């Protein structure tokens, strides 16, 4: 039986995560304004095809198409009120792709609700906890190996999400923030403050994804590594900064440069590397080749 996520981390194995979901779907025909999660029901073949492409590229971990899968965020999608069904179906699609190659893990992706926590907005800790707990339960029922809170920017929402998830699941949990203001999130959170808040909570890994430039991500990684918190690092940056071509975002950072930075992240102490927006299966294949020379 293949080792699980935490066993691999404890063994010191370097793992490669997959690449972009939303921007990859746009290249596959996803219309502007359509939530990527809609494709779980509308285009399951395309969802499966992208998962399989990342598995074929050598990814050790693939993420479910559920970034916007909380009941709160699905209110703005084509499938409001179907969070449990959608998350379970998305996990099953990813599980099918993972089964084509030994040892591939499935991470249940959970992004922020898009709402601001009180007192800045209407989202309460209780509502957030309930929404993320519901999503986590459905992802676990669908067969994921680990759970991932990704692209968070507000510490309070992440803490509420962790609380809700922990009520219903004992799966390994990774928490990743987007430091899209250089070395801070849009709410002013620094990598150091993130670690201080999450260190006592027993998460399996912490890290950064999305963000701004690769150079900025390297600064974030350096700060995280310098803390020597004893928690594995999960690092999945964008393929550089986007430029708009019509309605589509284009990312000009190629596979070789992404792979070069991935190696630098590993040398700094990252246990999981991969790509976020703009990262194709070709980017992932280059990262795999660089992370496993010879």
Image (cartoon, rainbow, N blue to C red):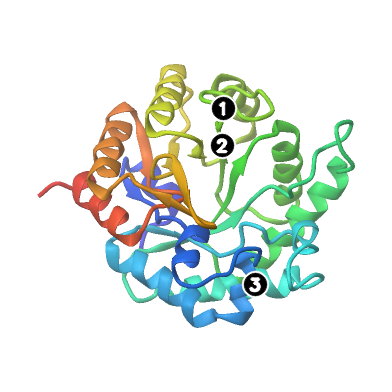
Other-residue count near label 1 (Cα within 10 Å), few / some / many at <14 / 14–19 / ≥20: some
Q: In the rendered view, tell whether residue 207 sits above or below residue 164.
A: above
Q: Is residue 56 above or below residue 44?
A: above
Quadrant containing the N terminus is: bottom left
Percent across and percent down for residue 171 are 58, 54
Horizontal arrangement in the rendering, residue 283 relative to residue 244 (left or right): left
The mark found on residue 38 in the picture is 3
Q: What residue is drawn where x is 75% and y is 33%?
A: 156
Say which residue appears at 25% left-offset and 52% top-offset: 288
Residue of label 2: 178
Labels 1 and 3: the sequence-earlier one: 3
Residue for point 74% across, 50% down: 113
| Numbered circle sitting on residue 181 | 1
Using the rendered image of the protein, determine whether residue 52 is visible from the camera's viewpoint.
Answer: yes
Point out residue 168 in the picture as x, y percentages from the top left corner.
73, 56
Question: Which element carries disc 3, helix, strand or loop?
Answer: helix
Q: How far, Cα to Cα, is label 2 from label 1? A: 9 Å
Residue 66 % position (x, y): 61, 62
Q: Do the residues labelled 3 and 2 touch (CB within 8 Å)?
A: no
Q: Distance between the residues labelled 3 and 2?
A: 24 Å
Task: Determine whether the residue tagged by mark 2 lies in a helix, strand or loop.
Answer: loop
The quarter of the picture where residue 79 lies is bottom right
| Number of numbered tags placed on the structure image | 3
Residue 76: image quadrant is bottom right
Please provide percent x and percent y for residue 255. 26, 49
Name the N-terminal-most of marks 3 and 2. Answer: 3
CA distance separating discs 1 and 3: 30 Å
Instruction: Select label 2 or label 1 by which is in front.
Output: 1
* SS at mark 1 in the image: loop
């Amino acid at each position: 039986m293949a080792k699980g996520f935490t066993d691999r981390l404890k063994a010191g194995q370097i793992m490669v995560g997959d690449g972009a979901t939303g921007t990859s779907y746009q290249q596959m025909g996803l219309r502007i304004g359509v939530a990527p999660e809609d494709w779980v029901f509308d285009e399951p073949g395309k969802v499966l095809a992208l998962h399989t492409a990342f598995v074929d590229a050598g990814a050790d971990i693939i993420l479910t198409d559920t970034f916007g899968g909380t009941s709160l965020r699905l209110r703005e999608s084509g499938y409001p009120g179907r969070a449990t069904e959608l998350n379970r179906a998305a996990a099953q699609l990813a599980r099918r792709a993972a089964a084509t190659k030994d040892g591939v893990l499935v991470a249940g992706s959970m992004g922020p609700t898009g709402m601001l926590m009180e007192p800045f907005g209407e989202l309460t800790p209780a509502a957030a906890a309930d929404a993320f707990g519901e999503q986590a339960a459905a992802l676990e029922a669908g067969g994921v190996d680990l759970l991932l809170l990704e692209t968070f920017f507000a510490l309070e929402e992440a803490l509420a999400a962790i609380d809700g998830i922990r009520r219903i699941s004992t799966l390994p949990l990774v928490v990743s923030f987007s430091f899209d203001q250089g070395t801070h999130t849009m709410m002013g959170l620094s990598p150091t403050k993130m670690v201080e808040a999450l260190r006592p909570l027993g998460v399996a890994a912490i890290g950064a994804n999305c963000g701004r430039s690769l150079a900025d991500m390297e600064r974030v990684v350096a700060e995280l590594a310098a803390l020597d918190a004893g928690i594995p690092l999960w690092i999945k940056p964008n393929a550089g900064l986007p430029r708009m071509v019509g309605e589509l975002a284009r990312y000009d950072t190629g596979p070789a440069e992404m792979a070069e930075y991935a190696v630098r992240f590993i040398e700094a102490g990252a246990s999981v590397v991969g790509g976020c927006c703009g990262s194709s299966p070709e980017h992932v294949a280059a990262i795999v080749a660089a992370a496993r020379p010879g």
